[in-house]
Image (cartoon, grey):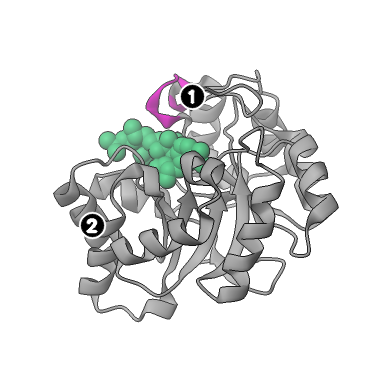
Amino acid sequence: MENFTLNNGAKIPSIGVGVWRIDDAEIAYNTIELALSLGYRHIDTAMIYGNEEAVGKAIKDSGIAREEIFLTTKLWNDDQRSGRVMEAIDASLERLGMDYVDLYLVHWPVKETYVSVWKKMEEVYKSGKAKVIGVSNYQPHHLDDLLQVAEVVPAVNQIECNPYLSQEAVIEYCKGKGIYPEAWGPLGAGKTDLLIDPVLTGIAKVHGKSAAQVVLRWNLQRGVIVIPKSVHEARLIENLNAIDFTLTADQMKQISNLDKNLRLGSHPDNFDF
Ligand SMILES: NC(=O)c1ccc[n+]([C@@H]2O[C@H](COP(=O)([O-])OP(=O)(O)OC[C@H]3O[C@@H](n4cnc5c(N)ncnc54)[C@H](OP(=O)(O)O)[C@@H]3O)[C@@H](O)[C@H]2O)c1
């Protein structure tokens, strides 16, 4: 498994498994148990996904040393609004049955608090309860404001990103500031025809790979972390095997040209939760 190095020196496996919408505790537990047995060492959860307890238990029961696993969870918007950031990470750690997470992200840039919350995130970082802190769904203008007050530069910005929403401007901005871009919904969240796009299936055929692997590879090759979600063994294996081939510069360009600014999730400047 390839690692990327974050701005404080921490290593993050370039491919993780996401667990959004795995609401059933047993399915969440089984998915993480399976993913770890297949070689995943990076898991992306959040308080709001409601499965931190199952994820933590599966990690513990795996017998794999805690330091070999990179675990992300996120600060939900209500806790951001109330300013209860240390309390929120403590509650997440309690559910996870852990004394630290590898990465703690501000889940969304809540308009009133997306800057001030960062000082509280820095306290979490200094407490050692998160080895790395970052943000999610931040646009460059949010980061510009945050960086005015930051002592610790966010290590990661997790954003919606796939070939139909290539996010080139945000990614370039982040790279310029030492912030690692990370793609959520990297496969189009199962909501689009992305994986049957003829450009992608054509490139996949050339490499003897699937369109999903090509899509993940495209992001990895441009230095973007990916966290595809699946509850199925064959797909978990497929997604993890997006590493053993290289797209040509022309193929990278063809994929980037598929961008149509198609956002499946909410816009970071306009969300109501
Ligand atoms: N920060 C944020 O605001 C935010 C927002 C959304 C998501 N996330 C994180 O990002 C993770 C990934 O995003 P996502 O779950 O929305 O979408 P995704 O990973 O792009 O897509 C998941 C969907 O694709 C299917 N799938 C998985 N592998 C496949 C393959 N190889 N071939 C065909 N279909 C495949 C899955 O179905 P099966 O499970 O049935 O295989 C599921 O329906 C989430 O789980 C979560 O951890 C973060």
For the point 57% across and 66% down, which residue is it?
124
Q: Secondary structure at mark 1?
A: helix
* Residue 204 point in image, percent of width and height: 50, 36
- Decide which of 181, 196 is in the foreground and name it: 181
Check disc 2 and give the amino acid type.
Ala
Q: Would residue 168 be found to the left or right of residue 72 on screen? A: right
View quadrant of ligand 1: top left
For the point 35% across and 46% down, which residue is it?
19
Disc 2 to disc 1, how far (Cα)?
Answer: 31 Å
**Of all residues shown, which one is farthest toward the left?**
26
Crowd tier of the residue under label 1, counting other residues whose Cα lies within 10 Å: few below 14, some 14–19, many 20 or above: many
- Decide which of 238, 264 is in the foreground and name it: 264
Q: Secondary structure at mark 2?
A: helix
* Residue 97 point in image, percent of width and height: 29, 70
For the point 76% across and 44% down, which residue is it?
143
- Residue marked by disc 1: 194
Crowd tier of the residue under label 2, counting other residues whose Cα lies within 10 Å: few below 14, some 14–19, many 20 or above: many
What span is in magenta? 189-195
40 inside magenta stretch: no
Rendered view: 218 above or below 166: below
* Residue 209 point in image, percent of width and height: 45, 42
- Decide which of 102, 212 is in the foreground and name it: 102
Rendered view: 257 above or below 119: above
- Could one spot residue 184 in this view of the protein? no
Q: Nearer the viewer, mark 2 or mark 1?
A: 2
Where on the picture, by quarter, is residue 183? Answer: top right
Check disc 1 and give the amino acid type.
Leu
- Could one spot residue 96 in this view of the protein? yes
- Residue marked by disc 2: 54
Q: Would residue 254 be found to the left or right of residue 203 on screen? A: right
* Residue 242 point in image, percent of width and height: 48, 51
For the point 67% across and 54% down, which residue is it?
118
